[in-house]
Image: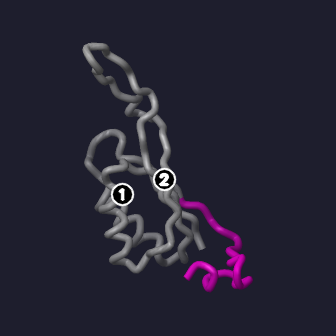
C-alpha cells in the first residue's frame, strides 16, 4: 500500500475529484493548505494599496491505495491539475506498512476498501 499526497490549486479540486471517481477512488482526506515554492507568492492591489501574499492557498488531497492503483491516480492528477504554469503543485508517494480500520479491526487492503 502507498500513501499519496497531492498539493494542488483549489480551483482544480473538483476536476480531480471527478477524475478519481471515474477510477472508483472515493476515500480521500482533503485539507486546506497554504504554501510557497517557485511561485513565491503573488502581489495584489486593494483600494490602491499594493500588498504581497507570500503563502498561496492550496488544497492537500491524501489517500491510501493499493500499489497497482498509484500510476493511474498519478495520471489523473497530472491530467486534471496541470495548467502548465508555476504553482500547479506536487505529488508525494510514501510506503504504508499497515492500515487498521478502528471500527472493525480489519487490516490491510480490507481496511481501505
Rendering coords of residue 41 (x, y %): 39, 29
Query: Would you identify the image quadrant in which residue 2 lies?
Result: bottom right
Query: On the rendered structure, is 106 left or right of 109?
Result: right
Along the line of sight, which residue is nearer the eye, 59 or 47?
Answer: 47
For label 2, the residue is 60
- The local crowd at label 2, few if under 14, some if 14 to 19, many if 20 or more residues have their Cα within 10 Å, is many
What is the spatial separation of the Cα atoms under label 2 and label 1, in whole angstroms? 9 Å
**Residue 25 image label:** none
Which quarter of the rendering shows the C terminus? Answer: bottom right
Q: Spot the residue most to the top.
A: 49
Which quarter of the rendering shows the N terminus? Answer: bottom right
Question: Residue 108 magenta-drawn?
Answer: yes
Along the line of sight, which residue is nearer the eye, 47 or 15?
Answer: 47
- The local crowd at label 1, few if under 14, some if 14 to 19, many if 20 or more residues have their Cα within 10 Å, is many
Query: Would you identify the image quadrant in which residue 71 lies?
Result: bottom left
Query: On the rendered structure, is 27 left or right of 75?
Result: right
For label 1, the residue is 13
Which residues fall within the magenta stretch?
93-113
Query: Would you identify the image quadrant in which residue 17 lies?
Result: bottom left
Which residue is rendered at x = 33% and y = 61% of the image?
14
Q: Is residue 89 above or below residue 100?
A: above
Which of marks 1 and 2 precedes in the sequence? 1
Q: Secondary structure at mark 1?
A: helix
Q: Secondary structure at mark 2?
A: strand
Question: Residue 43 magenta-drawn?
Answer: no
Most common SS among magenta residues = loop
Which residue is rendered at x = 34% and y = 66% of the image?
76
Q: Spot the residue most to the front.
A: 47
Rendering coords of residue 16 (x, y %): 35, 63
Rendering coords of residue 56 (x, y %): 41, 36
Amino acid at each position: 500500500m502507498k500513501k499519496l499526497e497531492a498539493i494542488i490549486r483549489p480551483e482544480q479540486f473538483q476536476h480531480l475529484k471527478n477524475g478519481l471517481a471515474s477510477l472508483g477512488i472515493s476515500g480521500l482526506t482533503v485539507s486546506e493548505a497554504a504554501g510557497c515554492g517557485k511561485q513565491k507568492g503573488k502581489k495584489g492591489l486593494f483600494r490602491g494599496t499594493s500588498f504581497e501574499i507570500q503563502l498561496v492557498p492550496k488544497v492537500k488531497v491524501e489517500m491510501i491505495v493499493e500499489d497497482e492503483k498509484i500510476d493511474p491516480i498519478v495520471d489523473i492528477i497530472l491530467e486534471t491539475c496541470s495548467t502548465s504554469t508555476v504553482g500547479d503543485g506536487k505529488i508525494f508517494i510514501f510506503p504504508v506498512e499497515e492500515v487498521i480500520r478502528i471500527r472493525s479491526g480489519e487490516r490491510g487492503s480490507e481496511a481501505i476498501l
